[in-house]
Image (cartoon, rainbow, N blue to C red):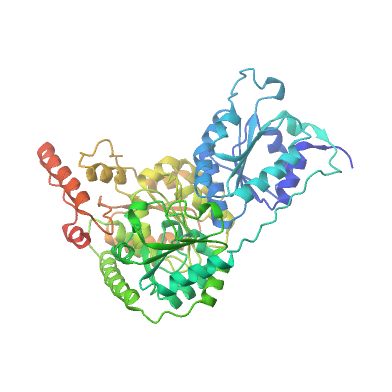
Amino acid sequence: MADQRTGQIIVDLLVNWGVRHVYGLPGDSINELIEDLRKRQEDIEFVQVRHEETAALAVSSYAKLTGNLGVCMSIAGPGGVHLLNGLYDAKADKAPVLAIVGQVHSEEVGTGAFQEINLEKMFDDVAVFNKRVQTEKQLPDLLNQAVREAYTHKGVSVLVVPDDLFKKTQSYDVKLTSESYYRPEVSPQSHHMEEAKTLIETAEKPLILAGQGAANANRELVTFAEKIKAPIILSLLGKGVIPDHHPYCLGQHGQLGTKPAYHAMKECDLLVLVGTQFPYRDFLPDNVKSIQIDNQPDHLGKYYPITVGLAGDAKETLGSLTSILIENNNSDYLEKYQKKMKKWSVALQEEKRSTEEPLHAPQVMYHMENVMQPNAVVSGDVGNVTVWLSRYLSLVDQKFLISGWLATMGSGLPGAIAAQKAYPDRQVIGVSGDGGFSMVMHDFATAVQQQLPIKMVILNNSKIAMIKYEQEQMGHLSYQTNLGDVDFAKFAEACGGEGYRIETFEDLTTKMKQAFLSNKPAIIDVVIEDQAPLPGHIDYQSAANYSKYIIKNFFESGDLDLPDMKETIKRLY
């Protein structure tokens, strides 16, 4: 076989690994590889973005959504720095990602050359595999190893490559490594299954907390819950695992959660954690027996003092466990919280179906539901918008995507772009606050250039409202949280997309439908009134701190900024 450019070999390997999209920006320290990608553009597409942060957030979203490797590229120096936020999102949410980062010419490394920084040191904390390639001969084998490490550890692999190595030629007729990864099967030990069986069959008030690890086990999860008569609470990342209106579902938990979920957690005598690393210890019960199911043994007992750990895949483990259990005939605890949840849901529906003005976020969620298609992907952002999505947007079989553990603002648009590239035939909806969207709004132009028919719904209250509420909840006056009024609909039109400005209830009923009938990228800019994202349950300390803010604000400005007192009283003890 004749010698080949090393860049050509790398592109061939990426294609063999199943990579179909690479996100990034071309530049001087990766232009040699860009040329090799250009020559294979029918097999692997380079998705040009406006900022490398968007590239990294997009591939993190792609990996979380599909389970497949997300790949991004950047130049040395500033380009590599820009990747970090998205790579940390992938690390935090355990998404397999490969970053190929250019470096100055091999002979200039270590000399303080233009745009040279110590990339290996910078990426050391975020990556499970982090190597600088020294010679072109190393590169194919290091690439294969980087991909395997990303899949094995569900994390970020980084290859730092001086651009001159890509144009060097070599023979690759004798391979030293293969482009393959074999996923292991993990099963719980039989005596642990027996211990779990005993705990479940002696429990009177069993409760399930399920996360994203149960996404491929929704049928087994429901069958298990029905047999042991246990209500199901979902973590934020678990939203969509079962339909929000399923009779066993109590919604989310924590600050974003429901009041029935809060009290069911306090009352349970057995907690079964399925595919979740729920981090908020204050929202979990003390001195309660617990079982945890996770396919990564190092997760068992990491965030909660479990009684028994079942190291195994959720689908297989739940199926096996259900088959050996005696059915629970006592449904008192389940029925109690089903009644509470029904009452809670009726109250939420009243808020969502309101026709009042100024508009509020729950109304927007209801009208989104009316245009949301089966099997759609919803890419949510972080902030108050997370509360409205978690609590008020009812999913049936749609996929929900968000920055979970890192909770970075600005993730909604990159997630929508990645979702539409991954699933071109599905409806994709991005939902952001004006704060989160303004961090990445430049890349709406990417959606236009790529002709992606995404719909970005902006909840526009001219504030970073979650921070305002957090300041007030601490008893402080809000400071530097106003953003000013931006017409994002006009911005969409300036980018070549469609823009819809919604300011009245009549606009909401007509323009939302009009926007979703379009096959072009669109921004639906909904002007909403600032509204405190009240927790599902409010404790007295939080209420007392918020009262301090109200008093301070009154004496400072003369304004009486009261939350919705009817809703506040509902959520107290």
Q: Quadrant of the C terminus?
A: bottom left
Residue visible at 58% across and 54% down? 421
Outermost bottom residue: 329
Answer left or right for 343 relative to 25.
left
Q: Position of residue 237 (x, y in %)?
A: 45, 57
Q: In the rendered view, would you say 90 is above or below 165?
A: below
* Residue 45 seen anywhere in this rendered image of the structure: no
Q: Quadrant of residue 344?
A: bottom left
Answer left or right for 313 relative to 279.
right
Q: In the rendered view, would you say 573 is above or below 205?
A: above
* Residue 37 seen anywhere in this rendered image of the structure: yes
Q: Position of residue 416 (x, y in %)?
A: 50, 53
Answer left or right for 235 relative to 100.
left
Outermost right residue: 1
Q: Quadrant of residue 264?
A: bottom left
Q: Position of residue 463 (x, y in %)?
A: 30, 43
Q: Nearer the viewer, residue 402 or 75?
A: 402
Q: Quadrant of the N terminus?
A: top right
Residue visible at 51% across and 63% down? 214
Outermost top residue: 111
Q: Nearer the viewer, residue 71 or 121?
A: 121
